[in-house]
Amino acid sequence: MGSMKEDDFQFSMTFMGLALEQAKFALDNLEVPVGCVIVEDGKVIGFGSNRTNETRNATRHAEMESIDKLLEQWQASGLSQSEVAEKFSKCDLYVTCEPCIMCATALSILGIRAVYYGCANDKFGGCGSVLSLHQSEIKDVYRGFKCTGGIMSSESVTLFRNFYEQGNPNAPKPHRPVKTTQ
């Protein structure tokens, strides 16, 4: 994981704030509260939030949602595979929680330039907590990417606590029951 200069940190606060808005949207929709934005040349060009419960598809993480939207948009505009790869190499991802192993692998294959995240993902993290996929480079497969964590991590953790305190009504049994007020 890299460290940030003060100027870069302040710049990243804005984008992480937007990622947190996406995570709050997920929480409001009974999803695990993870959100992200993809930035190119200082502008948000993509965003996403978890949709695993809504879609009943465990791969619909915030990162995958935002990637798929961009891929669809870029392919519809006629960009070739190499042009899409070039665009991703100029993009940064801001996400509220460290990308899981699946998402970190996808980001590496796509050739994302950098990832900035909020809290660590101690169970499934692919950017240092469990595996360090951001440091892996295999010619023509994995490109590796710069990775910086800990940006607004307490806000991200608070959203997770809120989600787990309310219970996950979409979780299969025997997971934690939904709290009821009496």
Image: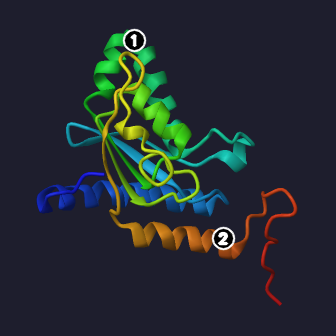
Give the class, few, some or many, for how many residues have Cα within 10 Å of label 1's Cα (few <14, many ≥20).
few
Vertical position of residue 86 compared to residue 127: above or below:
above
Residue 79 screen position, x and y as percent:
36, 12
Instruction: List x then y, in percent, for residue 1.
Output: 31, 51
Q: Is residue 117 visible?
A: yes
Crowd band around label 2 with a 10 angstrom C-alpha radius: few (<14), some (14–19), many (20+): some
Q: Position of residue 82 (x, y in %)?
A: 34, 11
Left/right placement of residue 135 relative to residue 57 reads left
Q: Nearer the viewer, residue 55 or 151?
A: 151
- Secondary structure of residue under mark 1: helix
Asked if residue 59 lies left or right of residue 11, the reply is right
98, 131: nearer the viewer? 131
Q: Which residue is mark 1?
A: 81
- Picture quadrant where residue 11 is located: bottom left
Hey, what amino acid is under mark 1? Gln
Residue pictured at 64% horizontal, 58% vertical: 29
Q: Residue placed farthest to the right in the image? A: 173
Residue 100, compared with residue 97, is above or below; it is above
Q: 114 or 51, which lies in front? A: 114
Q: Secondary structure at mark 2?
A: helix
Choose the circle earlier in sequence order: 2 or 1. Answer: 1
Placement of the C terminus among the 4 image quadrants: bottom right
Residue 15 in the figure: left or right of residue 27: left
Looking at the image, which residue is at 48% across and 31% down?
Answer: 106
Residue 142 occupies quadrant: top left
**Does residue 78 appear in the picture of this structure?**
no
Q: CA distance from mark 2 to mark 1?
A: 40 Å
Name the residue located 45 percent from the left edge and 53 percent from the top edge: 98
Q: Would you name the residue on which mark 2 appears?
A: 164
Amino acid bearing label 2: Tyr
Say which residue appears at 53% left-offset and 59% top-offset.
Answer: 122
Above/below status of 172 relative to 159: above
